[in-house]
Image (tube, rainbow, N blue to C red):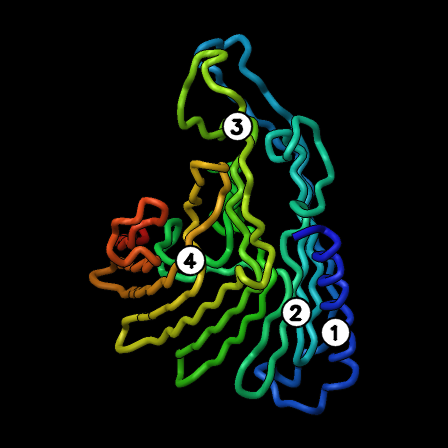
């Protein structure tokens, strides 16, 4: 999505937030208490980072990079509405699309979304990133938001996620139950670095052995690439449990052999999750089934169906 679209969405969200806070304070009951008051908060942090990149083939030529990192946050907290916006910029050359520091606004805007708290549900709309699943760093069915692998090791999992333009409904039930529905009008592919330490090298060839290949990525910023997700979570006698369904795309791309067009397979994703504590250990597990259009598993142009699962635990010392 272009910066202009994101900018327009952000401005609309800010205007809706202001209008709602002025004209609808008495129309709906709220999850929040009467003691909450409207408040606009700015926060931010600036860091001067350093990174040593070791070249094992030539230690003398190893680089030490010094670069700034800036994070800014804007939060509006009202009685029945909230707005959350954040921007981040890293001056490391490998984090940009070119070898020079550039103000790429598409990468600078981190999140910008509006929250509306109503009687029986709350609504989130805007440029959002979220996580579905019970694990800590690895997930089997957290698929709606794309990931930025430009810096694969250092950021937290949520920091590698790319915010998506979407609408999300959260419907609480019972004591701890929650139904989440999400709709994203477009699909955003994962971002891989074009330079630096984390560039992927799938093959090697001698100079002149192969001609330069031009890849043609599919346009996924259309209504035909909409995504839908549904998740239900609840707790029973010490067990946190959940189930999810997503109509989305596989993150692994397909490259056509005739015109080198890059596309992504549609998939029905079914996920299960649970977490509980036993003998002081925090146990987490997930499982997911990815159902593609290749039901028989014999179409080389479509990914096969797949099952993913994980099991993990930790204990506080």
Q: From the viewer's side, name the closer residue of 106 and 235.
A: 106
Disc number lying in front (4 or 3): 3
Disc number lying in front (2 or 3): 3
For the residues labelled 1 and 4, say whether their Cβ atoms are less than 8 Å apart.
no
Marks 2 and 3 sit apart, C-alpha to C-alpha, by: 43 Å
Q: From the viewer's side, name the closer residue of 184 and 120.
A: 184
Q: Is residue 15 above or below residue 23?
A: above
Mark 3 or mark 1: whose residue is earlier in sequence: 1
Disc number lying in front (4 or 2): 4
Report the disc number at residue 114: 2
At x 64%, y 65%, the residue is 126
Marks 1 and 4 sit apart, C-alpha to C-alpha, by: 34 Å
Marks 4 and 3 sit apart, C-alpha to C-alpha, by: 26 Å
Q: From the viewer's side, name the closer residue of 177 and 35.
A: 177
For the residues labelled 2 and 1, say whether their Cβ atoms are less than 8 Å apart.
yes
Crowd around label 2: few <14 · some 14–19 · many ≥20 (10 Å): many
Marks 2 and 1 sit apart, C-alpha to C-alpha, by: 8 Å
Q: Position of residue 217 (x, y in %)?
A: 55, 43
Disc number lying in front (3 or 1): 3
| Secondary structure beneath label 4 | strand
Report the disc number at residue 213: 3
Mark 4 or mark 3: whose residue is earlier in sequence: 3
Marks 3 and 1 sit apart, C-alpha to C-alpha, by: 46 Å
- Is any part of residue 154 visible from this angle? no
Disc number lying in front (1 or 4): 4
Mark 4 or mark 2: whose residue is earlier in sequence: 2
Q: Position of residue 184 (x, y in %)?
A: 55, 64
At x 50%, y 64%, the residue is 227
Report the disc number at residue 16: 1
Crowd around label 4: few <14 · some 14–19 · many ≥20 (10 Å): some
Q: Position of residue 267 (x, y in %)?
A: 39, 59
Q: Which residue is mark 4?
A: 266
């Amino acid at each position: 999505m272009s910066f202009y679209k994101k900018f327009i969405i952000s401005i609309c969200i800010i205007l809706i937030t202001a209008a709602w806070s002025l004209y609808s304070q008495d129309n709906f009951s709220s999850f929040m208490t009467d003691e909450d008051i409207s408040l606009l908060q700015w926060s931010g942090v600036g860091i001067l980072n350093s990174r040593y990149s070791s070249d094992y083939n030539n230690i003398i030529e190893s680089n030490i990079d010094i670069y700034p990192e800036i994070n800014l946050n804007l939060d509006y907290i009202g009685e029945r509405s909230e707005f959350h916006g954040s921007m981040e910029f890293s001056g490391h050359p490998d984090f940009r699309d070119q070898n020079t520091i550039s103000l790429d606004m598409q990468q600078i805007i981190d999140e910008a979304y509006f929250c509306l708290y109503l009687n029986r549900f709350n609504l989130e709309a805007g440029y959002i990133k979220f996580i579905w699943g019970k694990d800590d760093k690895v997930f089997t069915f957290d698929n709606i938001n794309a990931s930025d692998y430009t810096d694969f090791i250092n950021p937290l999992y949520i920091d590698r996620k790319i915010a998506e333009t979407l609408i999300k409904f959260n419907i609480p039930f019972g004591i701890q139950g929650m139904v989440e529905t999400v709709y994203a009008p477009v699909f955003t592919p994962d971002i891989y670095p074009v330079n630096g330490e984390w560039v992927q090298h799938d093959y090697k060839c001698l100079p002149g052995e192969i001609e330069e290949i031009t890849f043609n990525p599919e346009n996924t910023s259309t209504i035909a690439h909409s995504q839908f997700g549904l998740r239900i979570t609840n707790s029973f006698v010490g067990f946190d449990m959940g189930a999810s369904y997503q109509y989305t795309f596989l993150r692994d791309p397909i490259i056509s052999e005739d015109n080198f067009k890059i596309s992504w397979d549609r998939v029905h994703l079914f996920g299960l999750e649970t977490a509980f504590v036993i003998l002081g250990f925090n146990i987490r597990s997930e499982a997911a089934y990815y159902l593609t259009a290749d039901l028989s598993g014999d179409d080389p142009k479509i990914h096969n169906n797949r099952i993913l699962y994980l099991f993990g635990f930790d204990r506080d010392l």
